[in-house]
Amino acid sequence: MNLEELLSECTFERVTPTLLEQCEPFACGHDDLDEFFRSDYKLYADKLLGKTYAFRLIDNPSKIVSIFTLSNDAIRIKQLVAEDKEQIEYVTENGEKNLRRFPGVLIGRLGTNQTLSRKGYGTAVMDFIKAWFRSNEN
């Protein structure tokens, strides 16, 4: 499974209570993650702590392939190793002022449907997230 295959087999949507009602119960095999994606994701969204997204099969929209929550984050530049620090400082130079933190995205939680585990979906979802946030359109 690669990113291109994921996008050809699945739809990408923001998770809502309506979407979850239309789907089979999601289970990735980790009770705390399953519980989060069943109900706690909504609290995160309501408190603006993170947004949850899902990939569903086009041929079987009731099946969630993978689900994940993203939050805003930042990397503290001073805590990086010298080589990485120099690279980020070069990118973030702004006249006389350098950023102390580099903006980032935190993948707070990610789960793949346990019936589809070990088929490369998780890796493809990670590739999607990386491409999504590197895109100039985002």
Image: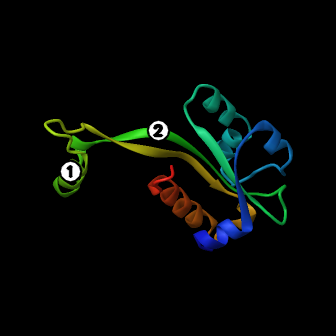
Q: Which residue is mark 2?
A: 72
Place residue 69 in its image quadrant: top right
Q: Earlier in the sequence, mark 2 or mark 1?
A: 2
Q: Is residue 55 left or right of residue 94?
A: right
**Residue 83 in the image: x percent, y percent?**
18, 58
Q: Secondary structure at mark 1?
A: helix
**How many numbered marks does the figure carry?**
2
Q: Is residue 125 left or right of residue 88?
A: right
Of residues 36 and 123, which is closer to you in this image? 123
Q: In this rendering, does residue 86 appear at all?
A: yes
**Residue 32 in the image: x percent, y percent?**
64, 42
Q: Is residue 47 left or right of residue 63?
A: left
Q: Is residue 121 left or right of residue 92?
A: right
**Residue 82 in the image: x percent, y percent?**
16, 53
Q: Are marks 2 and 1 in contact (CB under 8 Å)?
A: no
- Residue 131 drawn above or below residue 100: below
The disc label shown at residue 53, or none: none
Q: In this rendering, does residue 119 appear at all?
A: no
**Quadrant in the picture for the N terminus:** bottom right
Place residue 76 in its image quadrant: top left
Instruction: Specify the farthest residue to the left.
Output: 96
The disc label shown at residue 85, or none: 1
**Residue 129 in the image: x percent, y percent?**
53, 56
What amino acid type should be assigned to the residue bearing mark 2? Asn
- Determine the residue positioned at 20% across, 48% down: 89
Q: Secondary structure at mark 2?
A: strand
What amino acid type should be assigned to the residue bearing mark 1? Lys
Place residue 59 in its image quadrant: bottom right
Residues packed near mark 1 inside 10 Å, few (<14), some (14 to 19) or many (20 plus):
some
Residues packed near mark 2 inside 10 Å, few (<14), some (14 to 19) or many (20 plus):
some
- Determine the residue positioned at 78% across, 37% down: 17
Q: How is the image coloured?
A: rainbow
